[in-house]
Image (cartoon, coloured by chain):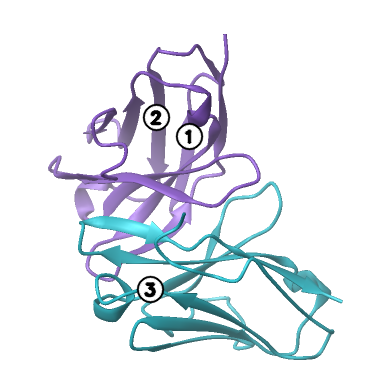
Amino acid sequence: QSVLTQPPSVSAAPGQKVTISCSGSSSNIGNNYVSWYQQFPGTAPKLLIYEDNKRPSGIPDRFSGSKSGTSATLGITGLQTGDEADYYCGTWDSSLSAVFGGGTKLTVL
Amino acid sequence: QVQLQESGPGLVKPSETLSLTCAVSGYSINSGYHWGWIRQPPGKGLEWIGIINHSGTTYYNPSLKSRVTISVDTSKNQFSLKLSSVTAADTAVYYCARHKEGVDWFDPWGQGTLVTVSS
């Protein structure tokens, strides 16, 4: 059971928009920055969003992050088949631990 | 360009100690950041193991703390993971990654190495 809660899967058609939620508590998301990671099968996770809503160099602006209270959201617009991957949220917890969500599998129909 | 590369045995017997090393290139561990280990059991999500900084300060996952030791060798620009008394539940892909303290993101990540616990 992950500390952060994500939907197991989401899906949308190419060109559409999708959002992935990440729910936590005041012990983690509520008082710390959230990051998001993209993972393709058989490869390492890649940083997609950091400090709630910032994009590393090279990440398209189709990807966005937001946070409100104890929940965070990853948004992806203009969906492409190449966006099919697993997405994880992560943050720090007051237990002095890094924590991750259980991951969300994105399917582009 | 910062790169991390894990190395170590791919097969460990139950009750023995898993040992992995992460070699860092393109950045000096002494220059800052934390350096961490994350694992992913087959078909499952990410589990944080722990982090260390250049001076040896560590933070461990409470659920693994009794079995985990992370150490750093600044002369070789690498850090290591030891996980004792392993069981089949410790079978996973083990990743090393650079961690930014205070804002808590991991980047970049190593390619990962699969460790199987089996007799």
Do labels 2 and 1 touch, CB within 8 Å? yes
What's the CA distance linking mark 2 and mark 1? 6 Å
Residue with the mark numbered 3: A24
Q: Which residue is mark 1?
A: B6
The amino acid at mark 3 is Gly
**Residue at 41 percent of width and 27 percent of height:** B20
Front tag of 3 and 2: 3
Instruction: Looking at the picture, tell me which residue is in the foreground, B49 or A82.
Output: B49
Query: Label 2 lies in what chain?
Result: B
Give the Cα separation between the discs numbered 3 and 2: 32 Å
Q: Colour of chain A?
A: cyan
Q: Residue B64: x, y in percent?
A: 31, 36
Q: Amino acid at mark 1?
A: Glu
- Indicate the secondary structure of the residue bearing disc 3: loop
The crowding category of the residue bearing disc 3, from other C-alpha atoms within 10 Å (few below 14, some 14 to 19, many at least 20), is: many
Element under disc 1: strand
Mark seen at residue A83:
none
Farthest right residue?
A: A109
Residue reaching furthest to the top: B119
Label 1 neighbour load within 10 Å: few <14, some 14-19, many 20+: many
Residue B21's disc number: 2
Residue drawn where x is 60% and y is 71% of the image: A7
- Vertical position of residue A57 compared to residue A86: above or below: below
Identify which residue, B115 or B118, lies in the foreground. Answer: B118
Gap in Å between the C-alphas at discs 3 and 1? 31 Å
Element under disc 2: strand
Residue A56 is at least partly visible in this image? no
Protein chain holding label 3: A
x 44%, y 48%: residue? B47
